[in-house]
Structures are given as structure tokens and as C-alpha cells.
Amino acid sequence: MVMAPTVKVILGSFAFAVFWVLAVFPAVPFMPIGRTAGSLLGAMLMVLFQVITPDQAYASIDLQILGLLFGTMVVSVYLERADMFKYLGKLLAYKSMGSKDLLFRICLISAVSSAFFTNDTSCVVLTEFVLKIARQQNLPPHPFLLALASSANIGSSATPIGNPQNLVIAVQSKIPFGEFLFGIVSAMVVGICVNVIILLAMFWKLLSVQKDEEDPTVEVTPEEDVNSHRFSPATMSHLTSQNSHELNAYLESMSIHSSPGVKGSLDYTLRNRLGSGDNEILPKEVTDEKSLQKKEEKVVSRVPSTNGFVNEKCDVGLEDIDEKSAKWKIVLWKIGVYAITVGMLISFLLGLNMSWTAITAALALVVLDFKDARPCLEKVSYSLLVFFCGMFVTVEGFNKTGLPSAVWDFMEPYAQIDHISGIAILAVVIVVLSNMASNVPTVLLLGARVAAAAATISPENEKKAWLILAWVSTVAGNLSLLGSAANLIVCEQARRAQNFGYNLTFWAHLKFGVPSTIIVTAIGLTLIRA
């Protein structure tokens, strides 16, 4: 692509820099407006500076990606109401055989749930549960938190719906869901196993020595409390019973005391990820506690006896009948939610349009619920959708400057995927950019160029290039604490957890993240198949 005039290059680069700074550090002191507003500001500057026309800006917004993202968020909201995440959490504590078994379970459950419910959702749901189990078993939380965050990132790489950058890749590459899954799943499985081995190697002594004495100032969490924990994939789980104004007050107070980078990232994540907290499944008249506890009515019936028919009073509790009816309705509703979700995944595997399939599944769940869907739809992260719109426009404007193409033209001869050195160089570029500019903008900037270069070799190499981009950009999030939103969610929720908070520091994460990212990425690259 030919470079644009110098003025456009400078103005377009400035607009992209504004977007980048606010996306990576959403609470910078000179403009603490957050990621969503930052992406809109970058988009507005691109149009205002005439780097891109208004018509080009609207055309750059990918409705397929937005539709797929919206549909999967709605499905996740209903899955949370159907207690899917509570059941996943219970698997962590079920017949646990010690610290190493718990570590393996966390890695496995985190990876699998992330592949189908997104990595951020899994981390929001499972973090406090992991802390409770570690406290209940008197275990150090540090290795388990690292296991949760890193495995969530690795697991999310396997499917197009595991994380936002995979959504972009799946839509742009038009790789079917099944081919995407089978192309990366072996790398994901081996990557999880390698990640477990690295964790065990680094923390073997810590996991082998269980504390004999407990801190008398902190009460150990009872096992029944662990098993009864209630989850919410958009807010901290210990805030789910609070009203919305209380949550807002909490976030405001948190934004005052947190450091700028972590504060802004958590605020964006908690406010903009899909939400739940509405556990109401049946109409009020069915589930109202008072209606289920109304006065027992007596039913008089005639029963035969040896002396003829006499009146006998049979105590029949109508509230028991109502309770059983309500429970069965709940069970049937949950089965319906799970069946629709499985149907959506099967449709993906059959190659149906993922965006419309996800939207259809979301509307099927709304109809199944058979009541006003507004409370559930309000929990969808519309701020995240707006962020994507602004990002599409900003990245498209930056591409119009010709600067990304010029940089890639310089790198392309050294980053061909038909030989090992080229794959290694490409992987390093993706890892660095994913940690500097975030993974989704990296995919938008590099995706088409990497695929076009690989297509000149063969169609199989083009598909492999997309899969390499998906794998490396996702696993790269494990490098540092700021590498992915999932890491920040685990860190901040662990620090804010009631009674058993734990501070996972940047350097503690980096000591594990660097070797894990390098080793897992390298091994996975050898297992990706077109």
C-alpha cells in the first residue's frame, strides 16, 4: 500500500496513539476517560483529521463480529442464571485429593470453560471460588491464581468464541468453527499440560508443605460455604446480592484507591463484561417466598373403613405441591437453556453462520424464559460493543496511513511461515505487539497482511497463518499481568475478596509468565495444523 501524505500519516498516527494509550492505560491522569470513550475518541479524530471519510468509518465496523459477540454474551447471561458456573465451581472441590490435584483441576476446568464461555467470564466466575477452596484446605493461593488466569488464556485459544481476538479471526478468515477447533485443540491440550508441569515445577515445595498452624485472625471457610458459593460473570461474586447503586459506589471507591493501570482495566472489565446477578428464573407469583409459605390448607376426604364411610382429615400441604411444581419448572427451564446452548455449539460445528446462530440461540433463550427480557439484556456489555466499533474505525484509519503496510513490507521476507525461522520471527512480533498494543488491535493490524503473505505460498498456509495468529496472540496474554484482561480480573478480584484477599503482584506473575509463555507458545506452534 502506498504511503499517505505526510500530514495524514502524522495525524493518523497521533489518533491511533491516543486510542492505544487509553486502551492500555484507561485511567491515565491527563485523560481518565476509560477504554470505551478512548476508542470513540480515536475514531472521531480519524474522521476529524480526514484520515478516513465518514462513509469509510461506518463501512469499517464489522457487524458480524458485533452480532456474534452480542449473541454469546446473552447466552452466557442465561447460562449463569441456570447455575452452569456454580456446577463448574463444585467440580473443583469434588473429592479433591490434595493441592496438586486441585491445581490440575483448576487448569482443566478453567481451560474448558474459557473455550466455550470466554476467558474473562471464566476468571470472573472462578476466582473467588478458588480462593475459598484454597483457604478451606489451608493452601497458598498464589499458584492457583496463576493456574486459573494462564489456563483460561490458553484454553480460550481453541475456539472462535473463546476470546474477542478469535472472534475477529474467525470472521475475517471465514474458517469454520470445526476446522478452527481441530486446528488448535491439540496445541491447547498440550499447552495446558505443559502449563501444569511448569506450575508444579515452580511451586512443588510450596504445594507439598501444608501449613500446620492457621492464622488465628482469619476464619477458615467452611466446606458448605464453598459449595454454596453463588457466581456472577460480570461482577465480583461477593457483590451479586447488592443493588446496582451499591456496585457503582464500590467501583467508584475502588477507582480512587487502585493504581491507574490496574484500576482502569478492572473498572472497564467489571462494567463492560456481560453481567448477571438476577437469579430469578420463574415469575414472581411462582417463586415468591411468601406464596410458597402460605398457610397449610386442610382437605377433607371420605375414606372407607370397616364400619362404613367416615370422614377423615388428611393433611395435605399445598405449599409442598407448589414447591415441587416450582422446582420441576426450574429443572425443565435449566435443561432447556443447556439444550439450546448445546444446539448452538453443534450448529457452529456444522458450519452455520456463527453470528446469526449466536443471535438465534440468544433469542431462543429469551422466548424460553417467557417474560420481559429487559433485565437480562441490560446485563449485556454494550460498552464493549461500542469499544469494538471505535476500535474498528481507529484501526482502519491507521491502516489508511500506509504505515502498518510499510512496516510489514519490511518484515515480510523474514516472517514467512514456510520455514521455522520465519514462524519464530512472526511469533515474536505477535507476542511483542500483543503485549504493547493489546491482542485485538494486533490481530486487526496484522491479520490480513499475514494471511495474504501466506496465501502466496498455498491456501493451506493461509489458514495456518490465521491459526498461528490466534494461538500466539492469545497465549501472549500470559506474559505479564497487563497482558490480558483475564489476568487483571484474577489479580483485582483476589485482592478485593472478602476475608481472604491476596495480592498477586506484577513481578510474581512475570516470573511465571515469561517462561510459561515462551515454552507453551513454542510447543503449540509445532502442533497447529491447517
Image (spheres, grey):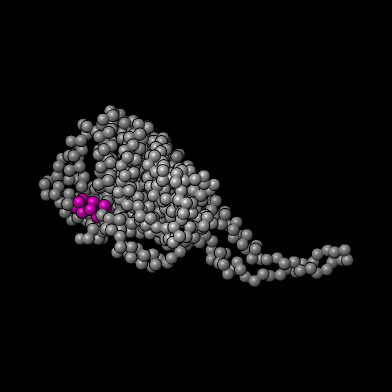
Q: Quadrant of the N terminus?
A: top left
Taking depth in this image into account, of 529 and 214 the one nearest to the observer is 214
Q: Residue furthest right?
A: 307
Quarter of the image holding residue 262?
Answer: bottom left
Q: Is residue 22 magenta?
A: yes
Q: Is residue 362 above or below residue 190?
A: below
Can residue 272 be seen? Answer: no
Q: Report the predominant secondary structure element of the magenta stretch.
A: helix
Residue 416 place in picture, x, y as percent: 25, 31
Q: Is residue 446 above or below residue 303?
A: above
Quarter of the image holding residue 245?
Answer: bottom left
Q: Residue furthest bottom?
A: 295
Residue 422 place in picture, x, y as percent: 26, 31
Residue in the image at 59% along x and 60% along y: 326
Residue in the image at 41% along x and 42% along y: 204
The mark tally for this picture is 0
Q: Which residues are magenta?
A: 15-24
Left or right: where 242 falls relative to 513: right
Can residue 349 be seen? Answer: yes
Q: Quadrant of the C terminus?
A: top left
Residue 402 place in picture, x, y as percent: 17, 43
Left or right: where 159 falls relative to 426: right
Residue 435 place in picture, x, y as percent: 27, 46
Taking depth in this image into account, of 230 and 530 the one nearest to the observer is 230
Residue in the image at 83% along x and 63% along y: 304
